[in-house]
Amino acid sequence: MSTLLQKILAIHSSPAICGIKASNLINLKITDELYEEIEELNKKYPNLCFYVLKNDGKNALILVYRKKVLERYLFKEENRAFLNSIGYETESVELMLLSLRERMEEDSFPHEIGVFLGYDLSDIKSFIEGKECLYVGYWKVYSNVEEKMEIFDKYTRCKNAVMRMIDKGYPIENYMR
């Protein structure tokens, strides 16, 4: 894996790679090797997934997640019910991801993507309703600000720890198993 890809993953996906967040999104420039590299990563790290949500011909938007973590989050009763209420097939993570991919082709960024990213459902609903947010961190916060700030701090500490290890020469693969 290239040093550049390691740094991109560390900066933008450490919480998902380390299993403390449902998923993260990365935006990568499409190269001749990109899809081969994604396929190789998916084979090499079976518990970690790199799922292309959108390809606009120049860039690929990739969802990085641990299967069990995303499944546990999406199958929470309230998250599953919300996705079902807006037309998602919710029998499996694969069907939900396929529905999300289709919606991303129609709409550049459907608001419910926040569910897949592990955002608090009440914050997602408040965002959709156009309410005024109280704080902006990894997402817009509409309630329980202190609790969300602690979560954001945990994500930032994770990212910084992974970056320090990469800077010391340890590959990000150490976290991807």
Image (cartoon, rainbow, N blue to C red):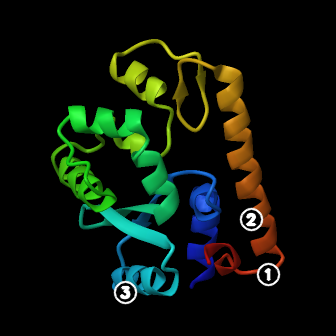
Residue 16, image x, y percentages: 57, 58
Q: Residue at x 28, y 38 (%)?
A: 83
Residue 65 visible? The answer is no
Quarter location, residue 59: bottom left
Residue 111, image x, y percentages: 33, 35
Residue lying at the far top of the rendered structure:
132
Q: CA distance from mark 3 to mark 1?
A: 25 Å
Is 125 in front, or is 12? Answer: 125
Is 147 in front, or is 69? Answer: 69
User: Tag on residue 36?
Assistant: 3
Secondary structure beneath disc 1? loop
- Whether 76 is drawn above or below 101: the answer is above
Residue that carries the numbered disc 2 in the rendered image: 163
Task: Look at the image and tell me in which quarter the C terminus lies.
Answer: bottom right
- Kind of residue at badge 3: Glu
Is 51 in front, or is 69? Answer: 69
Q: Residue at x 70, y 56 (%)?
A: 159
Residue that carries the numbered disc 1 in the rendered image: 169
Of the two numbered discs 2 and 1 on the same chain, state the one appearing first in sequence.
2
- Whether 74 is drawn above or below 170: the answer is above
Residue 69, image x, y percentages: 52, 57
- Kind of residue at badge 2: Met
Q: Residue at x 44, y 30 (%)?
A: 121
Q: CA distance from mark 2 to mark 3?
A: 25 Å
Residue 131, image x, y percentages: 42, 12
